[in-house]
Amino acid sequence: MTAVSALFDFDNTYARELKELVVAWQPDEVPAPSLVVMNSELAQELGVDADGLDGPGGASIFSGNTLPVGATPVAMVYAGHQFGGYSPRLGDGRAVLLGEVLDCNGHRRDLHLKGSGRTPLSRGGDGKATLGPMLREFVIAEAMHALGVPTTRALAVAVTGEEIAREGMEPGAVLTRVASSHLRVGTFEYSARAGDNDAFKKLVDYSIDRHYRQVLDAEQPYLAFFEAVLDKQAGLIAQWMLFGFIHGVMNTDNVTISGEGIDYGPCAFMDRYDPATVFSSIDHAGRYAYGNQPHITTWNLTRLAETLVSLVNEDFDVAAEALTSALNGFDDRYRSHWVAGMRAKLGIVVAKDSDGDFFDELLSLMQTSQLDYTSTFRSLAALLRDQAAEPVFGAENLIAAHWVTRWRSRLAAQGTELSQAADLMDAANPVYIPRNHLVDQALNAATKGDMVPFQELLRVVTDPFVERDGLERFAKPAPDGFENGFKTFCGT
Ligand code: AMP
Ligand code: MG
């Protein structure tokens, strides 16, 4: 215990200031904790000496058996719209917030244990998590971070020594998650409906202080706060779309106020480009399909707007009009983030008004030709470097050939070398993403006790833009037939 006493320098504002939204709660004691993966770089960022953590001391902390000194463990209360229906009381049913630490850059970060046992908010659940899904969240979060997408991070996964009943019996595990906060749209929904206006205002002021202090200078800070959240979400979803990512469960309890992606359950990266792609086994209607994500974000932000009405203006109509007008701005904001990202993906530095349409044409060609989303952009860059390279769309596709000709002349008109455009593209287009078949293989091996494939995949996808010899199999789409019927699961 003494060796770990000064591990984190906690300052737990959430538990201290938002008492209406937390329940003091201890993680379960588990029988045989053992660390399976540890993020030393992130530990360093948090000001922690990772060396002291890779033994039993770390296993004990990251399984919830030892509370680091200064932690104030609480289960957070929130609500949420799940697949469109309102659940008035969700909350941490299998997690606790340990507290907050200031990282090396002075940023406040939450430390959160997921899979740490039942809480008063567990409803029917067992409060536990299993190794596969926790490793899945780990590798997706760290891949996202490496791609430059705002995301919660993963510090460690420990197995607990328990066997947990899911499809069969699976190893129990706890993920230590690091987030700039766990404020969710669902937190706002819960608080706004709880009937205590002062407590709700305190939550909003807390969120502004933690994430959006710049709005305090605005004429209407609460409206400006909403616009700031909306812009962050527009930027986040644009990134997801640019990297072919499908979150899978964009319920309002899985949407952060900070604009970080959170709760990577049945998420996946798309292989063949198709806006209708859905992998999640629970998303029967395709509500959270790839191409629906911007639209669903507007829907989710509308739920956030509803909570803010009385703070924006005491006159309902005035508030509703202002918030609606902000919401109506979402599509343009999203589109401008996305168009800017596509320019980078295609090496274009001189903007044109018609760029969005030009990029849409490419996507529709990719869809018709059933091209792999991620590798197509690298192939296009390769085409610029080597005139003789294989035509990306197949030699017979004249429409695509016409698009490529127009794209090349766009680049030529920029006055830069084509090789420079190709370099720009390679800095925006990953070679390696956590492809479904690779994640599947790694998690299956890990569940059987072999962590080698997971560690290798993690190394590859956390350095996604630089092509390396010997890693060809990580850059390729799934073998034929794999994607047909491939489903992802929450594992809850
Ligand atoms: P998620 O789909 O993981 O975002 O979870 C939705 C809600 O279900 C949250 O309130 C979780 O805390 C809760 N939950 C998920 N899995 C479990 C579990 N095994 N036991 C208790 N609560 C759970
Ligand atoms: Mg969730």
Image: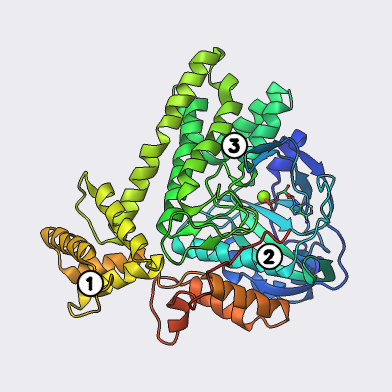
Q: Residues within 10 Å of mark 2 (few under 14, many from 20)?
A: many
Quarter of the N terminus within the rendering: bottom right
Dot 3 or dot 1, earlier in sequence: 3
Residue 170: give x, y in percent of width and height. Answer: 78, 71
Q: Separation of disc 3 and disc 2 at Cα?
A: 27 Å
Relative to 408, 373 lies left or right: right
Percent across and percent down for residue 415 are: 11, 61
Coordinates of residue 217 in the picture (x, y in percent)? 45, 28
Camera-nearest label, 3 or 1: 1
Number of numbered labels in the structure image: 3
Circle 3 sits on which residue?
A: 207
CA distance for labels 1 and 2: 45 Å
| Above or below, comparing residue 253 to residue 172 in the picture | above
Query: Residue furthest toward the front?
Result: 396
Q: Is residue 64 left or right of residue 14?
A: right
Looking at the rendered structure, the kind of residue marked 3 is Ser
Is residue 26 found left or right of 414 in the rendered image? right
